[in-house]
Image (cartoon, rainbow, N blue to C red):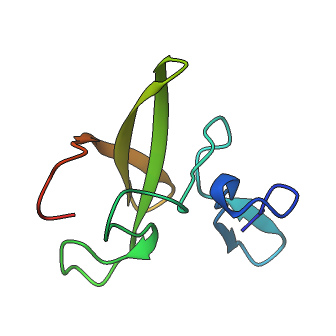
């Protein structure tokens, strides 16, 4: 994790694999994958969400609507055998009782 100067709400997850010569980034390099934060009980990070013994990455993204309101999204990245790719994005409802 890169905690972004100690602010845990802005940590970034980068996952690498070893190819026998060097490390290769297998998370999207153009996307900040933020496993920190989230609403209620949702936690980010590496989690096997579908029972296939391959961890997915749970991330969060905020969309600022105006200065006093933001929308929050949960993103799930799946491993395709080579790299992690965005699989789905779900809006987190602030009053969702499951959170």
Give the residue displayed 63% in from the left and 44% down from the top.
Answer: 32
Side of 34 relative to 6 (left or right): left
Residue in the foreground of this view, choosing between 67 and 50? 67
Residue in the foreground of this view, choosing between 57 and 19? 57
Q: Relative to 71, is 56 above or below? A: below
Q: Quadrant of residue 90?
A: top left
Side of 23 relative to 58 (left or right): right
Give the residue displayed 77% in from the left and 59% down from the top.
Answer: 7
Q: Relative to 68, is 87 above or below? A: below
Residue that extends furthest to the bottom in the rendered view of this protein:
53
Q: Where is the C terminus found, in terms of image quarters? A: bottom left
Residue that extends furthest to the right in the rendered view of this protein:
5
Q: Quadrant of residue 53?
A: bottom left
Q: Where is the N terminus found, in terms of image quarters? A: bottom right
Residue 19 image offset from top left, x and y in percent = 71, 72
Give the residue displayed 30% in from the left and 46% down from the top.
Answer: 87
Residue in the foreground of this view, choosing between 66 and 88? 66
Give the residue displayed 48% in from the left and 36% down from the top.
Answer: 62
Residue 92 image offset from top left, x and y in percent = 26, 44
Q: Relative to 85, is 25 above or below? A: below
Residue 56 image offset from top left, x and y in percent = 37, 67
């Amino acid at each position: 994790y890169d905690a972004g100067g100690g602010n845990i709400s802005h940590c970034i997850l980068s996952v690498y694999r070893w190819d026998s010569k060097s490390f290769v980034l297998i998370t999207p390099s153009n996307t900040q994958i933020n496993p920190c934060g989230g609403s209620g009980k949702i936690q980010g990070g590496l989690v096997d969400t579908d029972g296939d013994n391959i961890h997915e990455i749970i991330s969060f993204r905020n969309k600022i609507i105006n200065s006093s309101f933001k929308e929050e999204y949960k993103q799930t990245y799946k491993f395709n055998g080579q790299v992690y790719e965005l699989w789905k994005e779900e809006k987190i409802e602030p009053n969702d009782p499951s959170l």
